[in-house]
Amino acid sequence: MGILENSVHLIGRPGFDPEIKMVANRKMVKFSLATKDYSYNENHELEPVTSWHNIVAWGKTAEQAEKLIKKGKRLALEGKLRTRVYEKDGKKNYFTEVIMNEFMMIDYTSNDEQT
C-alpha cells in the first residue's frame, strides 16, 4: 500500500454522545469532535481556540463507537476528509466531515467499558 494522501489524525472530545442510524442496512454513527489549538490575539497573547469537526463512522467502527464514545471523553482518531456539495435555494453549499476509520479512547475511568 502506498502513502495515503487523504489522512486526518485528531485528538479531542465529543460534544455529544454519537447519534446512531441504520443506512442501507449498515450502522452509522455521527458526532462532533472539539479540538483545541492556540492563536495569538490582538494583544499578542496566546489564547485557546476550539474547532469543531463533524465525524462519521460506518460498520464495525460505528458499532465500537456506539459502545465506547461518550460526550466529553477524550479520544484519538484516524480518518479521511470528505466534502459533500448540495444545492439549496439555488446556492451550492459545502459540508466537510471526517470519515473515521479507527479510534482509541484516551480518557477512561473505572466505570468505563474497556474492550
Image (spheres, rainbow, N blue to C red):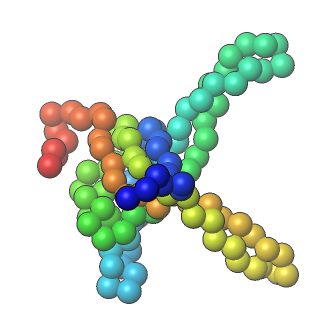
Query: Could you tell me how many numbered marks the image carries?
Result: 0
Query: Is residue 95 in sight in this rendering?
Result: yes
Q: Residue at x 73, y 13 (%)?
A: 45
Going by the picture, which residue comes out furthest to the front? 2
Residue 25 lies, in percent from the top left, at 32, 85
Q: Judge from the rendering whether residue 1 lies leftward or rightward of residue 68; answer left or right.
A: right
Residue 83 lies, in percent from the top left, at 63, 65
Which corner quadrant holds the N terminus?
bottom left
Residue 79 lies, in percent from the top left, at 44, 54
Of 20 and 61, the residue lying toward us: 61
Q: Residue at x 39, y 63 (%)?
A: 57
Q: Residue at x 55, y 32 (%)?
A: 36
> As displayed, is residue 109 above or below residue 92?
above
Indicate the quadrant where residue 105 lies.
top left
Q: Residue at x 19, y 42 (%)?
A: 112
> As displayed, is residue 64 above or below residue 115?
below
Residue 59 lies, in percent from the top left, at 30, 71
Indicate the quadrant where residue 22 lies.
bottom left
Of 3 and 25, the residue lying toward us: 3
Of 73 and 75, the residue lying toward us: 75
Query: Is residue 20 in sight in this rendering?
Result: no
